Amino acid sequence: MLEIKNLYVKIKNNLIIKGLNLKIKKNEIHVIMGPNGSGKSTLSYIISGKPKYIIDKGKILFNKKLINNLSPYEISKLGIFLSFQYPIEINGITMYIFLKNILKNKYKNKVLFKKIYKVCKKLNINKNNLYRYFNVGFSGGEKKKNEILQMLLLKPKLVILDEIDSGLDIDTLNLIFKNINKYKKKYKCSLIIITHNTNIVKYINPNYVHILYNGKIIKSSNKNIIYNIDKYGYKKIIKNENKKNN
């Protein structure tokens, strides 16, 4: 589904991603971990087409289609969804108007509210929130639920979750991952989950866990590597991989 070949990415002439390779098949979960500043969020931004992030070299293919130079809108239309680590606020636009506009090419207006309200119930989102300005005055947990609300309505093929689990209480965490797992099972989508949380395996069962360091993936393994991260941190893994490469 997604193939990244020898990717180099820079912003403001600073090289952030440095020769990254990644392959993701349909219906797979890939967890990406690594120290702060390794390029995890940059990777999510470049896949989703965020402006100012420049591909200096390499290719990003989605279902064999080159998406390097596509706009965020075009990438979204292909079926790629990014949940932001820090969801934005939009003053003056209600939740309902925002959702109505992103869905207008997908559903008929007459069934639109019923679809939105049905998904709100799944996430325990008060329907009155639909008439508040988008994310303005919402708690961190409410904002993260609003991200998953968009995901469930848009039905993407590839879901990128950038620290969806950060800052959430245990009940919200369980609710969000319950809906994510149900969605994946039903629609056979693929997931990229960027996280610092070594307890992530309590909520999902990844096919692969990748350690990103200094702009490239230095190690890919199964979920058992997370237990080593929890016990030893990243330093031991980085040291061992440097020894292999020297």
Image (cartoon, rainbow, N blue to C red):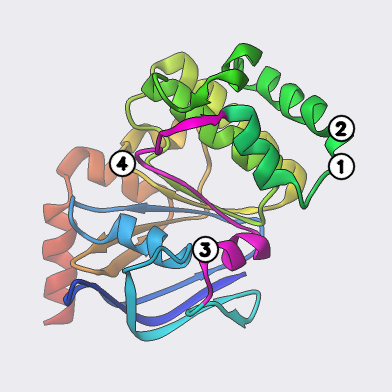
Q: Is residue 66 toward the left or the right of residue 217 in the image?
A: right
Q: Position of residue 207 (x, y in %)?
A: 52, 54
> Can residue 180 be seen from the camera position used here?
no
Q: Earlier in the sequence, mark 3 or mark 2?
A: 3
- Bin the neighbour count of mark 4 within 10 Å (Cα to Cα): few under 14, some 14-19, many 20 and up: few
Please provide the residue range marked out in magenta: 70-94
Residue identified by numbered label 3? 72
- Horizontal and vertical percent position of residue 194: 38, 49
Q: Are marks 2 and 1 in contact (CB under 8 Å)?
A: yes
Residue at (15%, 65%) from the top-left corner? Answer: 240
Q: Dot 4 corresponds to which residue?
A: 227
Picture coordinates of residue 169, whole percent (x, y): 39, 17
Marks 4 and 3, how far apart at CA:
36 Å
Front one among 11 and 166: 11
Q: Are marks 4 and 1 in contact (CB under 8 Å)?
A: no
- State which tag comes first along the sequence, 4 or 3: 3
Q: In the rendered structure, does residue 71 fall within the stretch colored magenta?
A: yes
- Viewer-side label of 4, 2: 2
For the residues labelled 3 and 2, the Cα–Cα distance comes to 26 Å
> Alpha carbon of mark 4 to alpha carbon of mark 1: how far?
47 Å
Give the left or right position of residue 232, taking residue 31 as reference.
Answer: left
Residue type at numbered disc 1: Lys
Quick check: marks 3 and 2 in contact, CB under 8 Å? no
Crowd around label 2: few <14 · some 14–19 · many ≥20 (10 Å): few
